[in-house]
Image: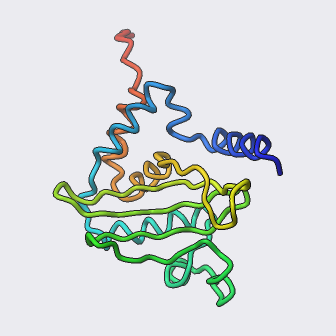
């Protein structure tokens, strides 16, 4: 598949899914990015991380090792060598990181959770397969605010509702009396 066709398919897929950053418009997308960049989960890592795994699995993304087992995916010995998926591993700062396998559109995701003074920061990165480079080299990597918002809706629906209201404020009451 040519790169323009792949980009078109990806854009159509994102638009059809009703992505928050795409449907919010330019101002709303900026607010969404600002709010999610600043947001920290109050819940501990052992509460949030299982939801990270479940979200990625619910999106049909292949997980590896213990992550795959926990969400009910089959992960054989050959998959360990042929997939880009890497199971959860610890970071030097006490966080966790994992990578999914490639989907049919040539994308995979990295999820990272890092504790800091404000709570727990979770970042999803969408990585595009680079067809023009050497095998094993990734293409463009972009932060996936829509995936982060989906996780927030699962883990902290009240915080997600506050951000949703900032991104797309409710219409003001008309003040009409009957």
Left/right of residue 170 with respect to residue 110 in the rendered view? left
Q: Residue at 31% across / 57% down in the picture?
A: 121
Q: Using the image, determine if residue 148 lies above or below residue 137.
A: above
Query: What colour scheme governs how the chains and residues are painted in the rendered image of this protein?
Result: rainbow
The picture quadrant where one finds residue 115 is bottom left
Task: Looking at this view, name the residue that lies furthest to the bottom.
Answer: 77
Task: Looking at this view, name the residue that lies furthest to the left.
Answer: 117
The picture quadrant where one finds residue 113 is bottom left
Q: Residue at 38% across / 9% down in the picture?
A: 176
Task: Looking at this view, name the residue that lies furthest to the front.
Answer: 134
Q: Residue at 68% across / 62% down in the picture?
A: 103
User: Residue 39 placed where, x, y %?
Assistant: 29, 48
Pick whichever, 127 or 10, lies toward us: 127
User: Residue 5 placed where, x, y %?
Assistant: 79, 43
Q: Using the image, determine if residue 177 lies above or below residue 76.
A: above
Left/right of residue 176 with respect to residue 6 in the rendered view? left
Pick whichever, 134 or 142, lies toward us: 134
Q: Using the image, determine if residue 89 lies above or below residue 165.
A: below
Q: Residue at 83% across / 51% down in the picture?
A: 1
Pick whichever, 99 or 35, lies toward us: 99
Quadrant housing the C terminus? top left
Q: Using the image, determine if residue 68 lies above or below residue 26.
A: below
User: Residue 168 placed where, x, y %?
Assistant: 43, 29
Tally of numbered tags: 0
User: Residue 114 placed where, x, y %?
Assistant: 30, 63
């Amino acid at each position: 598949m040519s790169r323009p066709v792949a980009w078109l398919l990806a854009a159509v897929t994102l638009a059809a899914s009703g992505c928050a950053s795409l449907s919010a418009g330019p101002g709303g997308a900026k607010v969404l990015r600002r709010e999610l960049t600043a947001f920290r989960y109050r819940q501990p890592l052992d509460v949030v991380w299982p939801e990270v795994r479940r979200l990625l699995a619910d999106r049909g993304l292949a997980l590896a090792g213990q992550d795959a087992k926990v969400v009910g995916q089959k992960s054989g010995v050959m998959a360990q060598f042929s997939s880009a998926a890497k199971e959860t591993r610890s970071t030097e700062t006490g966080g966790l990181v994992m990578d999914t396998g490639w989907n049919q559109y040539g994308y995979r995701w990295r999820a990272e959770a890092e504790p800091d003074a404000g709570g727990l920061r979770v970042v999803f990165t969408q990585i595009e397969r680079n067809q023009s480079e050497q095998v094993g080299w990734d293409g463009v990597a972009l932060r996936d605010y829509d995936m982060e918002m989906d996780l927030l809706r699962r883990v902290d629906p009240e915080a997600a509702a506050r951000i949703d209201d900032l991104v797309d404020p409710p219409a003001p009451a008309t003040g009409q009396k009957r």
